[in-house]
Amino acid sequence: MSKFHPKAKLWHQGQQEVWAGLEKAFAHQHQPVAWFHTASLGEFEQGRPIMEAYKKQFPDHFILVTFFSPSGYEVRKNFAGVDFVSYLPFDGASSSMRFLELVKPQLAIFVKYEFWHFYLTGLAERQIPLLLVSAIFRPKQVFFAWYGGFYRNLLKQFNHLFVQDQTSKDLLHSIGIEHVHVAGDTRFDRVLAQSKQVSSWDILEDFLQGQAFAVLGSVWQADMDRIIPLINKQSLPIKWVIAPHEIKDAELEQWKNAIQLSSVYSRGNSKVNWAEHQVLFVNEVGRLSSIYQGADFAFIGGAYGDGLHNTLEAAVFGPAIAFGDVNYLKFREACALIEEGIARTISTTDELEKYWLDLWNNPNQRTLIKAKSEAFIAKNTGATDAIMHILKNNQHD
């Protein structure tokens, strides 16, 4: 499989190299170790505010971050905010024991998901404080099924479980787990911090020239099937900024050819008069969270496929948000954005056109959405402080 699937190949290679990296990093390491485990990039972003707050509170401690997924590890393997980033060795009786004996964590924090039997039981046996943060639970999960005893026992290994909502807390209480705190979602803290650190991007400024614009963020083919016809109708007098979820040259070229307006790539051009184009394809990573700033409209991709991508990165800046109507219900923040009147689900091109045209012709309504967004983000921040309060009260240098 690894020969044919790039991610599987990366994971296999990472597992082969993991012990050499860990042994080198911990050969002469004597600081107290805080171990953060994040499955992939999304969980890392949820854990990041806690990592940063922890480093600020305990600057002499060593922060280890582990990933299971290559998509997280490859993007954040050189993250400067922690001391070492590694793959997590595969969960097994001998490998988990070897890992814990080598790393000797003083504290372990698992982010949102990932319940590895041997690691969790190994931590509990060594009486190492174990926290779960930014977790969210649903009635249909295996923990709450009659046959879920094995998995319920894994949850009982945690000293504290920080959940996003009261429903999660009630579900955990229903299976006898009491050490639960409703702290909220640390991603709100993350996007708010990000929004205060946004730097200008010359290309975007030259492209926009102060005009209104829409950002199509983390979009896939199914999203563009609805949006390209709207772009071509030219009913909205705006510019378009398109950031795909995955940068595939052939796919981007296909989209570019299907769009009748003048378009340009952000990367790979030598001399460009950016202002003369109507569509900007962002074919580089690391830009999306900042380009939402100032946008009038945002379409978040993924909901016609495996699942909706990050809506909060957009919401913190207050555009009118739209996304697909298929796979979004499991994303609590997306449902909340709909309830607050900040976002709307879309099935067809015509629906999206009507939604955004009505708002375009009603600037006061767009201003109201922006105000609602600011209030929504502010109301939901503070999870990091709540978690750090417990950590500080239970931590010793």
Image (cartoon, helix red, strand yellow):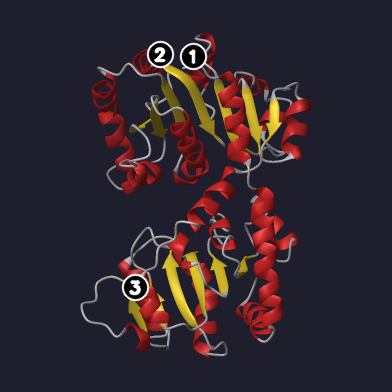
Q: For residue 276, say whether it is visible.
A: yes
Compared to residue 120, the image places residue 357 above or below, namely below
The label on residue 202 is 3
Name the one closer to the observer, 233 or 284: 284
**Foreground disc of the pair 2, 3:** 3
Q: Secondary structure at mark 2?
A: helix
Residue 69: quadrant of the picture: top left
Compared to residue 147, the image places residue 343 above or below, namely below
Q: Who's the residue at 52% across and 48% down the image?
A: 190
Q: CA distance from mark 2 to mark 3?
A: 51 Å
Q: Residue 62 at x, y = what percent?
A: 37, 25
Residue kind at label 2, given as amino acid type: Met
Q: Residue 392 at x, y = what percent?
A: 56, 25
Q: CA distance from mark 3 to mark 1?
A: 51 Å
The label on residue 122 is 1
Q: Residue 104 at x, y = what percent?
A: 40, 15
Q: Are marks 2 and 3 in contact (CB under 8 Å)?
A: no
Q: Are marks 1 and 2 in contact (CB under 8 Å)?
A: yes
> Label 2 belongs to which residue?
97
Q: Along the horizontal axis of the image, is 205 left or right of 122?
A: left
